[in-house]
Image (cartoon, rainbow, N blue to C red):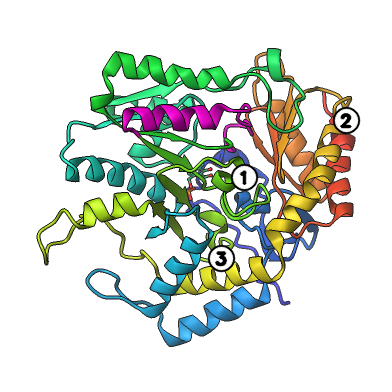
Amino acid sequence: MTSRPVIDDLSSFWMPFTANRQFKTAPRLLESAKGMYYRTTDGREVLDGSAGLWCVNAGHARDEIVAAITQQAATLDFAPTFQMGHPLAFEAAARVAELMPAGLDRIFFTNSGSESVDTALKIALAYHRARGEGQRTKLIGRERGYHGVGFGGISVGGIVSNRKAFSGQLLPAIDHLPHTHNLEHNAFTKGQPAWGAHLADELERIVALHDASTIAAVIVEPVAGSTGVLIPPQGYLQRLREICTKHGILLIFDEVITGFGRLGKATASEYFGVTPDLITMAKAINNAAVPMGGVAASRTIHDTVVNSGAPGAIELFHGYTYSAHPLAAAACVATLDLYRREGLFERAASLAPKFEAAAHGLRDAKHVKDIRNLGLVAGVELESRDGAPGARAYEVFLKCFEAGVLVRFTGDILAFSPPLIVKEEEIERLFGTVRDVLATVQ
Ligand SMILES: Cc1ncc(COP(=O)(O)O)c(C=O)c1O
């Protein structure tokens, strides 16, 4: 492949979630990718330990997906889905619906996880209004939750740095559950911690404070990813489900990271055996090849909203120009075919024990204060440097990148979520590189 010259002036692109000034003094530029590997503009191969941003579950630049997008671009580049349609939109929805828990088979398409979250919150409000309980407007999130960057998402989210600059304009009717992270009880747990299910009972306290009749929905990530891989305690999600059902509150699982095989099943809902009322998704829905997200709604929710309007009236005043964009839909169908043909969810499940052992092999590595994992996700928490939180993990990230391995970091937590096509020797290399790097970092 011929390389394009690297542009000298990096100033125009205001980069997202990036220390722009620092980055632009020493940029890390990726030029191409195939399978498990990126290639940098200076010609180095980098093992992708994070599936891009938790999204390229089938590995990079898969021929089948590339072909589907290419063909679609030449056939139907764009078609509106407002009062119009195109066949692939319906096919993609039906294919996504097949992978959702029974009954959650009505799919609203978006272009990102953030949009999926805001869409799900709006559907929850619309549902209660349609059934005559329009006073149910409160939304309950969780501390340390990440639900993207829309105003809805940061309001129910619980990451202080994402909220504080905008704190004067967050949604007004919000409360938060406590997070479940506790190293005193759960450090170095393999899989789900035994301690912590009782934290779901905090929802009863919140209900007692506000009254159930004012609460529309609870939203949580079944496994919290972006805040540093927080695995739900055994029984916790089941308890949340029971309390929501008891009080007529909708339960939303934000599966933007866990959807499409990350835990070895199509959804975390399936993995944990807990069915929410709404599921948000994005990322691996089409292997991140074209921006796409979605919300799976229960039939009850869908039918209540759709049947509430007068015949001929638009039922939900919500949607995006690019909802079910033809290229995204084509990539989605091709991706879901690939997942099935290659048995990638099952592959993730069968690799999970090996992945767990490799992650926990870092237990005695320098600076490591916790390791947690489930499916093909692991978090390794490091002791922070005095007065410089995040600095140590950033240095590890940089040195790993120099050594040809891409890992994610958030604060002082390293996160691992390779594509589901990862080989055992690549898992060894991933954690082996981190071990070597940790030994060199102060
Ligand atoms: C659980 C969760 N929700 C929402 C989002 C936001 O997705 P996006 O960046 O596509 O808007 C993310 C992104 O990582 C996520 O992890």
User: What amino acid type is highlighted by mark number 3?
Assistant: Ala
Residue at 59%, 68% in the rendered image: 335
Q: Position of residue 412 (x, y in %)?
A: 68, 27
Residue 116 magenta-highlighted? no
Residue sitting at 83 percent across and 57 percent down?
423
Which residue position is annotated with label 1?
Answer: 271
Residue at left offset 46%, top offset 33%: 241
Sequence-wise, the earlier of marks 1 and 3 is 1
Which one is nearer the viewer's eye here, 367 or 251? Answer: 251
Q: Nearer the viewer, residue 209 or 410?
A: 209
Residue that appears at 41% across and 53% down: 295
- The circle drawn on residue 289 is 3
Please provide the residue range marked out in magenta.
Answer: 225-249
Residue 217, picture quadrant = top left
Q: Is residue 236 magenta?
A: yes
Q: Residue 440 got which mark? A: 2
Residue 61 in the image: state x and y as whole percent.
Answer: 66, 69
Residue neighbourhood size for the residue with mark 2, other residues' Cα within 10 Å, grouped as few (<14), some (14–19), many (≥20): few
Amino acid type of the residue that numbered disc 2 sits on in the rendered structure:
Thr
Image coords of residue 408 (percent x, y):
67, 41
Q: Quadrant of residue 1?
A: bottom right
Q: Earlier in the sequence, mark 3 or mark 2?
A: 3
Instruction: Kindly check if marks 1 and 3 are in contact, taking CB atoms under 8 A apart as contact.
Output: no
In the shown orientation, is residue 217 left or right of residue 3?
A: left
Secondary structure of residue under mark 2 = helix
Q: Residues within 10 Å of mark 1 (few under 14, many from 20)?
A: some
Q: CA distance from mark 1 to mark 3?
A: 25 Å
